[in-house]
Image (cartoon, rainbow, N blue to C red):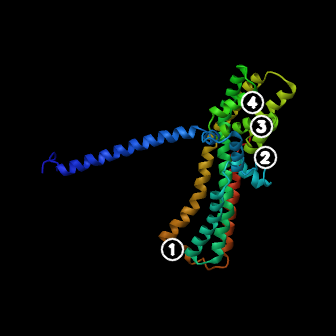
Amino acid sequence: MDALDIDPVYAVLGLVALAVVLVVEALYLLVYDKKDYRTRVNRRLSLGGKGDAPERVLVQLRRERGLNADGHASWSGWLQQLALQSGVRMGLPLIAGLVALPLLAGAGAYSATLEPTLALVAAAFAGTILPLGALLFLRKRRQAKFAEQLPQAIDVVVRSLRAGYPVPIAIAMVAREMPDPLGSEFGMIADEITYGADLEGAMRSMLARVGQEDLALFVTSIAIQSTTGGNLGQILENLAKVIRERFKMRRKVKGLSAEGKVAAAILNAMPVFVFMAINVISPEFYGDVWGQPSAPYVLGGSLGWMMVGNLIMWRMINFKF
């Protein structure tokens, strides 16, 4: 058969497949564009766009963060602060997930090993360590995003002040223009001021909800200016420059410590990889010593030394400034 002699049936099928791919791609781009537009609208504006009153939106935002209608924490402690600053939405889906996760982990471990002790350990790990790790990760990511957005928000406030607007109006402008997490947080400040809260109290409430260190400088600047006076626009402009320089320094430190982090990850993964490879290649290599009385102690000591090494490497690549 000639190389150019193509069966018309296959040609039609190929064109149909190409048309389906193009249609799917067009639909994806259409949906992605709308999704991207929705993500630029912060949570507060999204709730307000549904026709809810601003007061109801404020109460809902507070309750989603684990606060009561007055903005106070319904329970106290380090875990409450961690959950508040992580930005997770409190509700039945979250509670159901926290209940189902240890049950599924315990059931899976028991079905795989038929050992009740291992099932309890897996359930305890899934019910405590995993949620705490997730909250710590979400808080760190949220605070990093907030720190990245804060200089832009300060620039908006400075331009508004120079145009003659008061501070509450400038904060409301930030709430309308900035995406989450900063947009909704500043929006809550604007609503709290509207319903009778003082500016400094509303700002410190936001600082407690976010916990980002650069935000403390912004809150302190406004609090000092409100009592002593001064050119707030110039103060905030200088503060924005300082925060941008701190952000650049963090990026430089992150780049300089990247090599150490990769080395630490490789050193952690190498023993596990070698152990698994030896078990696959030569199962009897470790099989003869598993029954020895000293095997658990040797294994525990090895894991302990690995943890000590991880702690030393973490101290070497972790910079505080």
- Of pointers 3 and 1, the one earlier in the residue sequence: 3
Mark identifier at residue 70: 2
Mark identifier at residue 258: none
Secondary structure of residue under mark 4: helix
Count the labels in the image: 4
Front tag of 1 and 4:
4
Packing grade of label 4 (10 A; few <14, some 14-19, many >=20) is some
Front tag of 3 and 1:
3
Separation of residues labelled 1 and 2 (CA atoms) = 63 Å
Front tag of 1 and 2:
2
Residue 71 position within the rendered picture, expressed as x and y whole percent measured from the top left? 77, 46
The residue lying at 54 percent from left, 62 percent from top is 273
- Of pointers 4 and 3, the one earlier in the residue sequence: 4
Residue type for callout 1: Pro
Separation of residues labelled 3 and 1 (CA atoms) = 70 Å
Secondary structure of residue under mark 1: loop
- Quarter location, residue 288: bottom right
Tell me the residue that label 3 is attached to. Answer: 195
- Quarter location, residue 118: bottom right
Residue 32 position within the rendered picture, expressed as x and y whole percent measured from the top left? 47, 42
Tell me the residue that label 4 is attached to. Answer: 168
Tell me the residue that label 1 is attached to. Answer: 283
- Of pointers 1 and 4, the one earlier in the residue sequence: 4
Single out the residue that lies furthest toward the right.
Answer: 228
Residue type for callout 2: Asp
Separation of residues labelled 4 and 3 (CA atoms) = 12 Å
> Are the two marked residues, 4 and 2, in contact with CB atoms closer than 8 angstroms?
no
Residue type for callout 4: Pro
